[in-house]
Amino acid sequence: MTTDDRHPVCTLPTAPDYSRVTLISLNPEPAPRDYLEAMALANREAGERLGEHMLLSWYDRDRDFESPQHASECHLDSATPGYVDYALHRNATLRIDFQQGRFVFFYLAVDL
């Protein structure tokens, strides 16, 4: 797409909009040994902050694995990973991030 032949216009990737999400960064000592230990800590934190909650998506950098699986395949040129986009488009209200992205969990408060 161009405005004229001399000045091409490109859409640059933009960062995710976290304006409706509470962002929590955790750096526990000792650090979680693995994803399962991090998830247990994240679930406890989500329960304290949200009460009843649902885990929407997550990322494990140690294994380069995400849920929903393969969500990032459609986001290769995007500034937003697939697991983030998935959570934000399902109204996530809480992101818990361990060690600057080692493990990331997105939650939604659930009214029962």
Image (cartoon, rainbow, N blue to C red):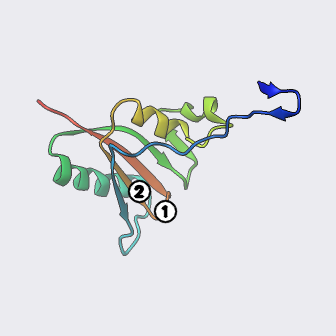
Give above or below for 68 relative to 50: above
Residue depicted at 29% across the width and 58% down the height: 41
Residue depicted at 38% across the width and 74% down the height: 30
Crowd tier of the residue under label 2, counting other residues whose Cα lies within 10 Å: few below 14, some 14–19, many 20 or above: many
Element class at badge 1: loop
Q: Quadrant of the C terminus?
A: top left
The image shows residue 65 at horizontal and vertical percentages of: 54, 43
Q: Which residue is labeled 2 in the image?
A: 97
Crowd tier of the residue under label 1, counting other residues whose Cα lies within 10 Å: few below 14, some 14–19, many 20 or above: few
Q: Quadrant of the N terminus?
A: top right
Q: Which residue is labeled 1 in the image?
A: 100
Residue 27: name its quadrant: bottom left
User: What amino acid type is highlighted by mark number 1?
Assistant: Gln
User: What amino acid type is highlighted by mark number 2?
Assistant: Asp
Pick whichever, 63 or 82, lies toward us: 82
Residue depicted at 50% across the width and 57% down the height: 101
Cβ atoms under marks 1 and 2 closer than 8 Å: yes
Q: Is residue 23 left or right of residue 79?
A: left
